[in-house]
Image: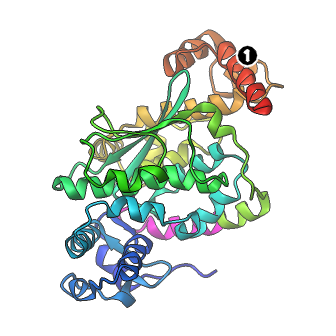
Amino acid sequence: MATPTPSRATAVGQNEISITAAYPRRLLNLLAERGHDIGPALLSLGLSLTDLDGAEARVSLLQYAAIAQAAMDATGDEGLGCALALNTPPTAHGPLGYAMMTAATLGDALALGLRYMPLLQGKAVLAYQADAQHAILCPLFNPAMTPPLPLRRFFAEAFMVGVARSAAWLAGLERIEEGELWFDFPEPPYHALYAAQLPPVRHGMPTTQWRVPLSVLQRRLPLADRASCERALAQCDREMAWLAGGSVNLSARVREHLQTQPGHYPAVDDVAEQLKLSSRTLKRRLAQQGTSFSALLEEARQLDAIALLRRPQLSLERVATELGYADPANFTRAFKRWTGLTPSAFRDKDKSDKAVSKTS
């Protein structure tokens, strides 16, 4: 496929936080199925339906927010974020969707989603954490955006329900029953309409997040195919290179440099140089996105540590060395801080979980 070229919608948002036009396009299709047409509202935004048609078309954050608000106004349905997420399969994510579908495990698909997030949503960062039992995905929405509650719910539900729903689709399931979706706002009146299609949901929580047992990330995907995944990723890399000319999610670009090779993590000065930024500017822009270089480095080490510990042929000393720890004791302390377990306890628990999974 040729290198993408901007459509009109792309040009509109090129110097702003932008997202793929696939999401507003699917939202408009959802409205059309319900008998609503907000085409005239698009014209007031300087857009038309044809502007959203291109595979590489993008819209600005403000345009997407305006489209979402117009959609909720037209339908009277503030639960459109849930409806959109539940009706957006991985194929709607373009090359990244196909790469995730053909990854080996759900955890591998997650790592790809984190790495290539700018291709989908420049408006949000998806941060990965883990404790002794759970993988935790938390959205960090751009702090410059403080929308009213209906729009905030729309973005949070479209994003996080989309993450949980995509994971289920990738695994070949109707939904993933394990774990919970948390939202930091009270239960909305429309929740009952969608509850049966969602994993267990808790509202009014301290943070918004999706948390699942770590064992869920080890599920092998039914469409796993290494060659297909590599072809899709080649296209993702081309699109990322093109997006690098505009304003993209800087956290994902830093993640990309940190995930090049486990144990060989570049320093902040080196990453800044590769991104053609000063170290000070890099740190400031990451702070604006609600994160830091040290937090992203910890995330990379944690993801790599879990992956390496699940390779039984590697000794704990070898895992520590692969992660760049000269002293295995330092690795043990770091891993216990991340997950609440020592590496050996984590490995024993993971082995036990896999045995239970095979017999269930």
Q: Is 26 in the magenta?
A: no
Looking at the rendering, in which quadrant would you find the C terminus? top right
Q: Quadrant of residue 37?
A: bottom left
Give left or right: position of 184 versus 210: left
Residue at the spot of label 1: 317
Is residue 195 visible to the viewer in this orientation of the structure?
yes
In the image, what residue occupies the spot 48% across and 77% down? 56
Q: Nearer the viewer, residue 132 or 4?
A: 132
Residue 143 coordinates in the image, percent (x, y): 23, 48
- Residue 21, located in which quarter of the rendered image? bottom left
User: What residue appears at the point 64 percent right and 27 percent down from the top-left corner?
Assistant: 323
Using the image as rendered, state which of residue 95 and residue 315 is in the foreground. 95
Q: Nearer the viewer, residue 187 or 146?
A: 187
Q: Which residues are magenta?
A: 233-249
> Which one is nearer the viewer's eye here, 128 or 271?
128
Q: Position of residue 330 (x, y in %)?
A: 57, 13
Residue at disc 1, secondary structure:
helix
Q: Quadrant of the N terminus?
A: bottom right
Amino acid of disc 1 = Glu
Please, is residue 192 above or below residue 71 in the view?
above
- Indicate the colouring scheme: rainbow
The answer to whether one can see residue 122 in this image is: no
Where is residue 210? Give x, y as percent.
Answer: 45, 40
In percent of the image, x 22 and y 69: which residue is there? 76
Task: Note whether 189 is above or below 317 in the view shown.
Answer: below
- Could you tell whether 347 is left or right of 150 in the image? right
